[in-house]
Image (tube, rainbow, N blue to C red):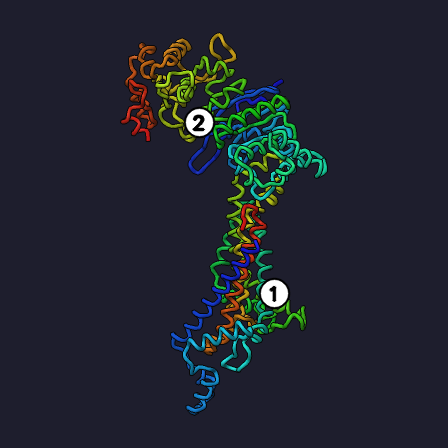
Amino acid sequence: MSLLEITDLKVHFETDDGLVRAVDGISYTVDRGQTLGIVGESGSGKSVSSLTVMGLSRSRNAHISGSIKFDGKELLSASDDDLREIRGDDIAMIFQDPLSSLHPFYKVGAQIVEAIQTHRDVSKSQARDRAVEMLGLVGIPEPRKRADAYPHEFSGGMRQRAMIAMALANDPKLLIADEPTTALDVTVQAQILELIERLQSEFDTAVVVITHDLGVVAEMADEIAVMYAGRIVEHADTDTIFAAPEHPYTWGLLSSIPRLDSPRDEELVPIAGRPPSLINLPGGCSFHPRCPYVKPAHMTTDPLLEPVPDTPRHRVACLLNADTRKQLWRELREGTAPVDARARVMKDVAAEGSAVQAAGDTGSTLTQASGEGRPAAATEEAGT
Amino acid sequence: MISYIVRRLLWSVLLLLVVSFITFLMFVVLPSADPALLRAGRNPSPEVVAAIREQLGLDRPWYVQYAKYIWNLVAHFDFGYSYQNNVAVRDTIFDRLPATASLAVGGAVTWLLIGIPIGIVSAIKRGTILDRIAMGGALLAISAPVYWVGLVSIYLFSKDLGKLLPIFEGSGSYTDFTEDPVAWAAALILPWLVLATAFAAIYARFLRANLLDVMGEDYIRTARSKGLGERRVVFKHGLRSAVTPIVTIFGLDLGILFGGAILTETVFNIPGVGRLAYDAIQKSDLPIVQGTVLIAALAVILANLVVDIVYAFLDPRVRY
């Protein structure tokens, strides 16, 4: 049995502007001690889905359906009190901005003590000893002294360490890290990731890392789920995601990060356009307005997350057929620009121009990459 | 910290000097009745007026008068003597202070007791009927002028005039606390409530807005993710931050009221500093006006200083 088992989770919010489909039917599992990376742009629903696991997205105008099973227990139907007992004890979370995530008026040690005493029937001094121990464990020098410091007296990296100490103080089975390094300096980022990895193996904690940066999860995640517009569009183990990705959006993410092993003059290819509004999702495949390989049929048919032929652990939600995808990725990996790759691989699609045209007509943006792999200025302007 | 306080106090002295100078200047520059004439009674002979003028020092140039005033103030803590009845201004004001303090402190306690719970409940129950009623009521309470609320409340609730529910002492029954504490409280309940009406409404709205702001902060999400109960999240984590700005305006409001709640004191006939100032202005009694203005300014300045010092204890990020 998996530690965390999410099935067809939907989180919709009623707003004045309409129904926001923040999470629109996602399923994944996390095993004990395993690390799952959830990758996507802002607004892809990755944070909302994990806040929902914690029961923190419950509100009057939130409609949540599906199933979240943690350790065999259904969380969606659990009472607020039951959830509260799990939060910070069995499931802990760390957040993006460690400064704003710690209460500015309370000492760091006291905030950790509070987390411990909420779930453990221990004396204040025992809780404090544990807090100091945790601060030491996450690499804060002179932890006994620093426990009496306020968050503003810590550096950014130290604050995130303190947050991690707080999250792990009760030895949780699952740690959710929501963009844990985004607000930190690059040099500190690596330290924090290393720390999470080290503590994970020490405590045998399962970890869900949410990030927009594939680089963050490349090292530490066992599996990666790529989210787009509230859905998982590709899910595979980490090596597969990097070696043989199947979804055009994943290709886009990979081409937009610099790699040390690629030629220095190779240009990064940004993903054109912007994530769609979660209120008015484009029909068909949600990614079609930004997809360089779109066909007319993709604008009406909704792709399902299905296993890739021959590799059943690898699932992708794309309407292109598997052979086409493999050929496209081969072209892209050799540095071919998306538009050229399309021209070479998808010769059968005579209606290319009309497809692009139609995509433009839906009011969404499709920026055509020019021959040099650079977005053409005119279309880029149309996109902003 | 100490050097900060000393520096602030020195600035305060300078500020008080400026305040006194401006008040003094207004009497010199603006047309007002001749105090000597007022003092002299009906149909005085010019000699009497001249004698009084000399006695009060009014025949000297204004800057000499001012310098003399300041000298007496600094050297002897002497605020001068009322033009009207020759009583020492210092004693007059100190006689009136207990009444003003009673009104201000009692009113402040009342509005905190009413305003803060309403603000908290409104924020927690945002958008509900309860919130709407509370905030609608607050708007009414802020909009109603205090003298009007005062007169209406006397009309409705005072023991002698009350048309609706004559349970509170009305105007003109102020008794000193030392004389009869029960009568003191009985006479002040209505003024406290009237004074508190608008303040409670302002505080409720302010606290509601603050608390709503704070409850959206990341550290509140952290508190919830630790598994804290909602009550603890609101009171220990939310309120702790939301109440801090309230302390600032509370200190200032209290300081201002110590300088005299002119309208409330007048409507309820409470012999406080506010009434004293009001009467003195009508009679061009410069020393009394000057004294009350200085006391009011001092109260505000001290309140400001206290607020800033308290703030350093409330918010660990603030250091002087």
User: Residue B308, image x and y in percent?
Assistant: 54, 54
**Residue A130's x, y, as percent?**
68, 33
Q: Secondary structure at mark 1?
A: helix
Q: Is residue A320 left or right of residue B302?
A: left
Quick check: B233 above or below B155?
A: above
Closer to the eye: label 2 or 1: 2
Q: For mark 1, what is the residue? A: B189
Which chain is mark 1 on? Answer: B
Q: Which numbered marker is on residue B295?
A: none
Farthest residue, direction top: A310
Q: Position of residue A135 (x, y in %)?
A: 62, 33
Give the mark count: 2
Q: Is residue A371 placed above or below A311 in the rendered structure?
A: below
The image shows residue B215 at horizontal and vertical percentages of 54, 42
Q: Which residue position is annotated with label 2? A: A41
- Residue A37 seen by the camera: yes
Of A141 and A266, which appears nearest the observer? A141
At x 63%, y 22%, the residue is A202
Relative to B190, does residue A128 appear above or below in the rendering?
above
Q: Is residue A73 left or right of residue B194?
A: right
Q: Residues within 10 Å of mark 1 (few under 14, many from 20)?
A: some
For the residues labelled 2 and 1, the Cα–Cα distance comes to 60 Å
Q: Secondary structure at mark 2?
A: loop
Q: Against A124, is A237 above or below?
A: above
Residue B251 appears in view: no
Q: Nearer the viewer, residue B169 or B5?
A: B5
Q: Nearer the viewer, residue B176 or A221?
A: A221
Chain for numbered disc 2: A
Give the amino acid type for the residue marked by disc 2 in the picture. Glu
Q: Residues within 10 Å of mark 2 (few under 14, many from 20)?
A: some
Tag 1: amino acid: Ile
Residue at 44% from the left image edge and 82% from the top image edge: B58
